[in-house]
Structure formats: structure tokens, C-alpha cells
Image (spheres, rainbow, N blue to C red):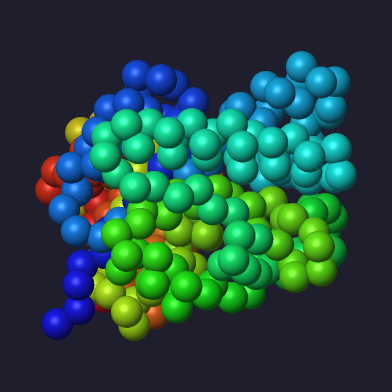
Amino acid sequence: MKEKLTIIKVGGKVVEDDTSLQLLLSDFAAIKGKKILVHGGGRSATKLAAMLGVENKMVGGRRITDESMLRIVTMVYGGLVNKNVVAKLQAMDINALGLTGADMNVICSVIRPIKDVDYGFVGDVKKVDAAILSDLISKGIVPVMAPLTHDGEGHLLNTNADTIAGETAKALAPYFAVTLIYCFEKSGVLRDENDDNSIIPSISYQEFQSLITEKVIQGGMIPKLENAFAAINAGVEEVLITSASAINAIGGTHIKK
């Protein structure tokens, strides 16, 4: 029987607020067994860019990453946010190791091809080295993964944190019984975004398609759920979408095969 592995993806809004981050990390530390934390940090990158006079360009909620913005996200994601999380986890006796995709060649990407939009230095994941991650995890190390990958040719690439979490979960599914948890400020996938009690407790792929047609699910929740179903189809045991304050609870929205 495979050992259980829990992968938590937490958004920038949580990791950039000291109180919510401390609560999240306390709950994360309480999770039994093997675990990985994947974090964002977009709001901090936006703030630093404004301070430095670098223009923030967004298309459809996705960041355009030119050379100046790449320097900023590298500083914020791989430095400020990542190392702050690692230090706080060490204080909780969690032996955390901060990683970008370039460290130990753990995630290699290809630069996103130009179609309607040139996203710049943005990476689409090509390969996750599950053997290296599995070895680290088996030694009791807890990877803390920043949303940066590399192309193998000396370039770092800004990469969506949801995608990193999903691709890492898929790659590790042959090694562990993986549960992937996407946590953010809402209690789960909501039927009414203004009603926190309107949680949809479980969603099948067919229901997902219907909810998109009905415009119940829209915006950034669509790619999050697409990542969730791709993970399930690749052997991940379960995906949960829930609030950052409820990662050890049984609520939220569950996606199973």
C-alpha cells in the first residue's frame, strides 16, 4: 500500500498576510504523513513592481512577464515569500526545503508559445522529476515549492502555482497515494459566489461542464478545476478545493474519479 502524500497549494492572498499565513502553516504542520506546500505570491509581486516603477500587465488574469517582471517575481516568489514560509515552518519543527523548478532540475518547462498573446517568460510544465522529489520526501524533508520553473537553457520562467501543484501531484501519483488540496479565501466551489454557504460538495466532470454552461463556474475557477480533473485522470486519489482555514476539515468541494 502506498504512503499518503498531501499536496497543499495556497494562494498569494494567504501567504502575504502574517495572521492568515501563521494559521495556515500551523494547520499544515498538523497534517500527518508526507506533505508538500506550493505557494503563490502575485500580490506581493504587483506591489514591488509598482514601488520599482515596473508596469504590471495582465491579460485574462494572467501576468505578462517581461525581463523586468521576471526579476521581480524571482525576488518575490523564490526569495521573500518562499524563504519566509520555510523559516516559519522550521520554527514549527517541519524540516522544510524551499525549491524553484531550477533547483535539482526538479521542474523543467517550455516557454509558452506565442498565439494571441505573448506572455513573455512564462513556462508550461514539461517534466517534474518525481524520483528526486520522492527521495527528498522519503527522507523526511518537506518541499516548499515556489511558482518558478526553468527551461534547462539558463532561463527561469514564471509558472502558474495551480499548474505546478497539479503537475507535481500527477508525477508523484505512482509513488504515493496523493491528495491535492487547492486552498484559497472561499469555502469551496460556490453555487453563488456571494453566498459562502452555497458550497457544491462534489463535482463530476459532466457536472463541471454543465456548471460552466450555466455560468455557475467561471473565471479563474475553470482552470483550477481543469487542473483538478487532469490530476484525477492521472492517478491522484482526490482533489479538494477549500478555504485556507479548513485544510484539515472535511468540508469544501471534493473531486474524485
Q: Which residue is drawn at 63% across and 52% down?
A: 148
Q: In this view, does 159 lie to the left or right of 173?
A: right
22 vs 237, nearest the viewer? 22
For the N terminus, the image quarter is bottom left
249 vs 156, nearest the viewer? 156
Image coordinates of residue 5 in percent, x first then y, are: 26, 64
Image position of 180 with respect to 3: above or below: above
Q: How many labels does the image show?
A: 0
Q: Residue at x 83, y 28 (%)?
A: 55
Q: Which residue is drawn at 59% across and 54% down?
A: 100
Q: Quadrant of residue 231?
A: bottom left
Q: Residue at x 38, y 72 (%)?
A: 134
Image coordinates of residue 252 in percent, x first then y, are: 22, 46
Q: Quadrant of residue 254?
A: bottom left
Image coordinates of residue 111 in percent, x first then y, are: 77, 65
Image position of 199 with respect to 168: above or below: above
Q: In this view, does 198 lie to the left or right of 40?
A: left
Can residue 182 be spotted in the picture? no
Image coordinates of residue 162 in percent, x first then y, are: 49, 54
136 vs 232, nearest the viewer? 136
For the C terminus, the image quarter is bottom left
Can residue 150 be spotted in the picture? yes
Q: In which quarter of the image is residue 51?
A: top right
